[in-house]
Image (spheres, rainbow, N blue to C red):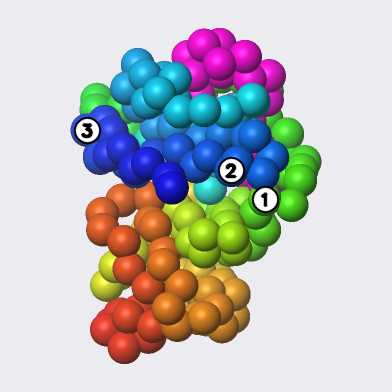
């Protein structure tokens, strides 16, 4: 089963998802405190590790450089529409979260069949969710939260697009599907249909 770590000043959720079938450890949104992620990863069994990013905001990527170096990861996997944000020197939340350093190269190639990538723009242009059907669980980043949705007042955000993404691509998934957001507690598709004030 996967492990959740809430890290950094913004308590961004980082997930370590081992898939025995492929021998791969997927590390989703390593946003801060690289040492904690590395220690957690080394306690798990895997043949190779990959970094998956739900989007390019600084609080979801800042530990990627240290993590990649420690675990021998050459690239992070990120939707092409967020590559500019990922590399931008303006990607920070000063004074609390400085720009990340030594970030590995980003690629928009998502390989293998361990998960499905669902493009859910709105919070950022390249926001995605990762659907691990074998578990089953949806790692949804900052697209949707328990009782809320991602912010759209940052550059590249768009409320109408975000709401359409959620309605068309998330609310059509099974009601009992567990969703693990980028901040806060887990929820389910069915719960958000009933209780999320945006729907």
Between circles 3 and 2, the one closer to the viewer is 2
Residue of label 2: 19
Q: Nearer the viewer, mark 3 or mark 1?
A: 1
Q: Give the quadrant of residue 40.
A: top left
Q: Mark 3 and mark 1: span between their CA atoms?
A: 31 Å
Crowd rating for badge 2 (residues with CA inside 10 Å; few <14, some 14–19, many 20+): some
Residue 86 on the magenta span: yes
Residue 96 or 186: which is nearer the viewer?
186
For disc 1, the marked residue is 114
> Which percent across, then down, holds residue 181?
38, 56
| Relative height, residue 2 to residue 46 (above, below) | below
Q: Earlier in the sequence, mark 3 or mark 1?
A: 3
Residue 197, label in figure: none
2 or 1: tag closer to the N-terminus: 2
Q: Earlier in the sequence, mark 3 or mark 2?
A: 3
Dot 2 and dot 1 residues touching (CB under 8 Å): yes
């Amino acid at each position: 089963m996967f492990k959740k770590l809430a890290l950094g000043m913004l308590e961004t959720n980082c997930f370590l998802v081992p898939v025995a079938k492929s021998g791969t450890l997927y590390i989703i949104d390593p946003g801060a405190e690289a040492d904690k992620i590395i220690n957690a990863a080394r306690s798990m069994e895997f043949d190779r590790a990959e970094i998956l990013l739900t989007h390019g905001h600084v609080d979801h990527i800042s530990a990627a450089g240290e993590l990649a170096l420690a675990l021998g990861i050459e690239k992070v996997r990120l939707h092409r529409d967020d590559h500019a944000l990922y590399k931008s020197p303006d990607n920070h939340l000063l004074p609390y979260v400085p720009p990340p350093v030594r970030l590995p190269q980003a690629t928009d190639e998502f390989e293998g069949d361990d998960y499905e990538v669902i493009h859910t723009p709105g919070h950022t242009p390249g926001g995605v969710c990762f659907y691990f059907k074998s578990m089953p669980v949806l790692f949804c980043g900052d697209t949707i939260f328990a009782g809320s949705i991602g912010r759209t007042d940052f550059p590249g955000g768009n409320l109408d697009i975000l709401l359409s993404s959620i309605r068309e691509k998330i609310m059509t998934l099974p009601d009992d599907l567990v969703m693990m957001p980028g901040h806060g507690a887990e929820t389910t598709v069915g719960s958000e249909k009933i209780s999320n004030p945006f729907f």
